[in-house]
Amino acid sequence: MSDLKIGRMVLGVCSTNTYFLYREGAEECIVVDPADVGRQIFANLRKNGLRVAGILLTHGHFDHIWGVEALRAAANEVAENHGYDAVKVFACKDEMELLQNAYQNVSENFGRACTVEADVYVRDGEELEIAGIRCRVIATPGHTAGGCCYYFEEAGFCICGDTIFQESVGRTDFPTGSMSTLVRSIREKLFVLPEDTKLYPGHGGSTTVEHEKKYNPFCV
């Protein structure tokens, strides 16, 4: 059985799931989609004995990136003071334009314009290892052009942002969205994972590949 653990904070105006992953007994963790109040995310993790080693973004919408800069700054202050490697932000290469455009990432429309420059832009199928935790990048365009999921095979779960929800899918009426592309991504990229793979979405509760293949009305 894997010792990889996953926790969740629900943050921001859209009740976005911010996940953090760590090995049992270890200090380092990975944060996925810092939704807001980056300093609060940092403080909560430190209070529980965890240190941020990397930040993964599933996509660039405002409610998944508002906390990035504050979290990265706080984490890098610790890294610099203690001689750790700099904390890097990872995002899919095809999401670069949206991340850097406050209109496309919809932050401008919500009165708090925000852009993010990732440190590392990844590609479909790329394997990442951060803090001894390995995952595979699965590009799932549709909700946005550069949306992606992170598959942690050893633990049997996938963090999937707004690609898929429990019996639903992400909206596609924002810039770079496409419903036909999204459904194809889900069928061809997520539904080929083992059926007991647990899916952790950007909003709401978790589900499984098996359940969504049977009951998701957008993809059956």
Image: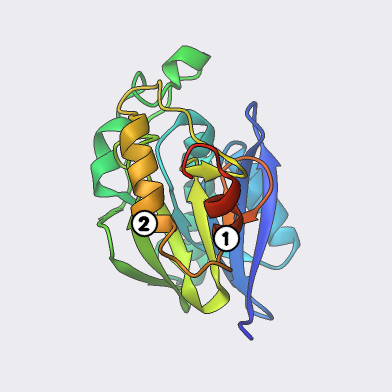
Q: Identify the disc placed on residue 210.
A: 1
Q: Quadrant for the N terminus, please.
A: bottom right
At which x and y percent is residue 7? 68, 59
Q: Quadrant of residue 108?
A: top left
Residue 187 picture location, percent across and down = 39, 51
Across and down, in percent, residue 110 comes to 52, 16
User: Could you tell whether 183 is left or right of 9 in the image?
Assistant: left
39, 218: nearer the viewer: 218
Q: Is residue 134 visible?
A: yes
Kindly report the distance in space between the C-alpha atoms of the residues bearing marks 1 and 2.
14 Å
Q: Where is residue 210, by image quadrant? A: bottom right
Answer with left or right where residue 200 lies relative to residue 120: right
Numbered disc total = 2
Closer to the camera in the image, 9 or 140? 140
Residue type at tag 2: Lys
Q: Is residue 166 above or below residue 3?
A: above
Q: Is residue 111 above or below residue 75?
A: above
Is 102 positioned to the left or the right of 41 in the image?
Answer: left
Residue 101, image x, y percentages: 31, 25
- For marks 1 and 2, give the one nearer the viewer: 1
**Side of 2 relative to 128 (left or right):** right
Crowd tier of the residue under label 1, counting other residues whose Cα lies within 10 Å: few below 14, some 14–19, many 20 or above: some
Give me the residue at 51% from left, 44% from top: 164
- Near mark 2 (Cα within 10 A), the count class, few <14, some 14-19 or many ≥20, is some
Q: Amino acid at mark 1?
A: Glu
Query: In the rendered structure, which disc, 1 or 2, sits on the residue that comes first in sequence?
Result: 2
Q: Which residue is mark 2?
A: 189
In the image, farthest residue toward the right:
47
Q: Residue at x 46, y 55 (%)?
A: 55
Which element type, helix, strand or loop, lies under badge 1?
helix
Per the image, label 2 sits on a secondary structure element best described as helix
